[in-house]
Amino acid sequence: MNDKRDVETAELSIWFFCGILMLAYGVVLIATGIFEYHNPPPNEILLPWLNALHPTLWWGVVMTVFGGFYTVRFWPRHKLF
Amino acid sequence: MQWTVRLGFRPMQVFAALLMAKGQMTKLAPVDVLILALYFALVVFIGFYAKGKANTSEDFFLAGREMTAWIAGLSFVSANLGSLELMGWAGAAYQYGILATHWYWIGAIPAMLFLGIVMMPFYYISKTHSVPGYLQLRFGEGARGLSAISFGIMTILMSGVNMYAMAVVMQTVLGWNISFSIWVGAATVALYVMLGGLRSAIINEVLQFVLIWAGAAMIPILGLIEAGGWTNLKAQIAVNVGRSDYTHLWSTLGSFKDNPMGVHWTGIVFGLGFVISFGYWTTDFLVVQRVLSANNLRAAKMAPIIGAAFKMAVPFIVIVPGLLALAVLKNPDGSVMHLVPASVAAVTGQHSYDDVLPLMLIRYCGPGLLGLGITALVAGFMSGMAGNVSAFSTVWTYDIYGAFINKKASDKHYVAMGRWSTVIGMLVSVGTAYLVMNANSIMDYVQALFTFFIAPLFGTVILGMLWKRATHAGGFWGLLAGTVSSIGMFIWTHSDPGALRYIALSPDAKPMAENLYRGLWSWLICVGITVIVSMMTAPVPAEQLGGLVYGVTPIPHDGSKTLWQKPIFWAIVVITVFFILNLMLW
């Protein structure tokens, strides 16, 4: 029974996959958002009201928080390989 | 494959519009390519990771039956949430207004709850591997063979249609070569499904569900900010369109003439909400397979309920963008942009209805967010292919190869057959994609074929589960009669468009109503023939019906202890929210 539980906890959770991908995307979006802070992309020039909202930066923050939570919460607790 | 596609919904227009588009819409920045590359890398890693857990047939075809309710539920709803569907229904929302929401709400929610509460116990405790497998237990080899062969052929063809759809979208939006998209998509999907089986497909479907929300949610959020909120959006649509019936769900359905879709509430409630929706969500093995992977009876009952709750939210990222486009899309000169049917777009060079989602994505999303949106579309296409090919491999191995060709092979042999059928199925799909590329009209017929089987199959399965007097002969002949009558009605309405007035019972009916009423009639014919033939043949002995039919099967307790654990409680919560939403948008 204990052996079985050990094997199960060593598995990578589906939520871990979701978390790590969202975290990676969040970090990429934050970096892009910071760059775009002073260099607005074409669609923000076309729609000036978007310029003040910084959607890429804020969506990056949301995804980093979401992805970071799931990555930490479902981080594999045992040696994997 | 996708719900709308299986309904035969306007696929030709979607493709014609995309094929006729002038040049590419946008291009990816390096950061967008990075986001797409990260997705592909993770998908392939998941395939290799899941391979180590796909050693037995139970592992490969049913993910070891160890998925939790949340994972099975998200996979259940995600298997249906393809990119072609997202783009098609966003276009439908632009064309028909909020009526398109019916395909997400009444066309899904009641059926999903019914599957969880009423039907899942029988699928689950019979320990069947597939829906044709249940038909074999209940109605014998004839009904199983008929449904397995039709499902197998159609599924693999649909995978090819999905593959071609992805290639066309990538060519239209980004200018990618069609063959490049087909082969990269096919190779990636074949690799991860062949390696990890259903487990790999499910992991990717859950990932895709999260990605679609991450990639598409910015459109309605930023769109509603631009429009000034929901109330202002409705007012602006009424001004731009010149009529106020685009934002009402039910109040315009009293007559075929009073709404832009040309449907009547009877078609929506009985045709869509009952027959077609129940047929798809409760008997299409592509979605039911996801729930069969649940790790216990309670999880199996909860999975469709969780799926229904998420399904109710999908119009936010599909229908709302279509409505927003009616209010905010403008030409460079500041006038309101009018999207047009594909046939008109081909002549005038305007954008067509089905360009709505890419147009809105490009409108609001700069580098980074655009890559996320494109990745979500790619993920949707790939998981659609994976869903089809994994369901095909299961039905082929269990219900065709294992049932009729090689009955006594070892478990290891069947796993190997599952892997090989995945690869061969994918190659057939690639062939289908090229076939469709050279003869677009084939696709309409491939998609229509699904609608032939879905409605009658629901009649056969539901009678099999609820009526112990239904016999083997009744089940087989009912299924055959329902399918043949559906094909007959399809040929009739396509050779004589005037026949629609008889099928839909009104001269004002539009083509959209055809599927709804054809499904209703073919279901009634299936049920009628099943009842008549069953009454004329000897009943099946009660001892053979244990675990298969209500009334002769003790349903085991699902293990829930508190109110919060009971599937019926959550089903009531979901259906209550469903009614409230419908009333709010009446």
Image (cartoon, coloured by chain):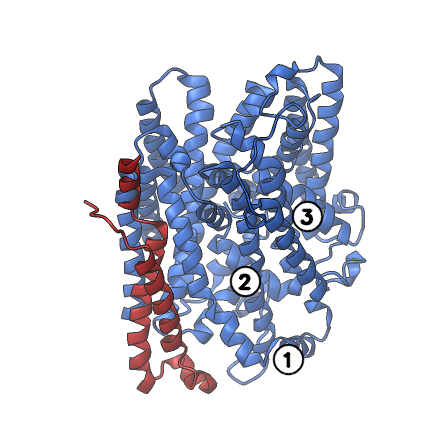
Kind of element beneath mark 2? helix
Q: Distance between the residues labelled 3 and 1?
A: 31 Å
Mark 2 or mark 1: which comes first in sequence? 1
Q: Is residue B293 above or below residue B11?
A: above
Residue identified by numbered label 1: B232
Q: Is there one chain holding both mark 2 and mark 3?
A: yes
**Amino acid found under the numbered disc labelled 3:** Gly
Q: Which chain carries label 3?
A: B
Q: Distance between the residues labelled 2 and 1?
A: 19 Å
Q: Position of residue A79 (x, y in %)?
A: 20, 47
Kind of element beneath mark 1? helix
Does residue B35 appear in the picture of this structure?
A: yes
Asked if marks 2 and 1 touch (Cβ < 8 Å), the reply is: no
Q: Which of B132 and B582 is in front in this view?
A: B582
Which residue is painted at 57% across and 72% down in the image? B324
**Amino acid found under the numbered disc labelled 2:** Val
- Tag of residue B318: 2
Q: Which chain carries label 1?
A: B
- Tag of residue B273: 3
Q: Mark 2 lies on which chain?
A: B
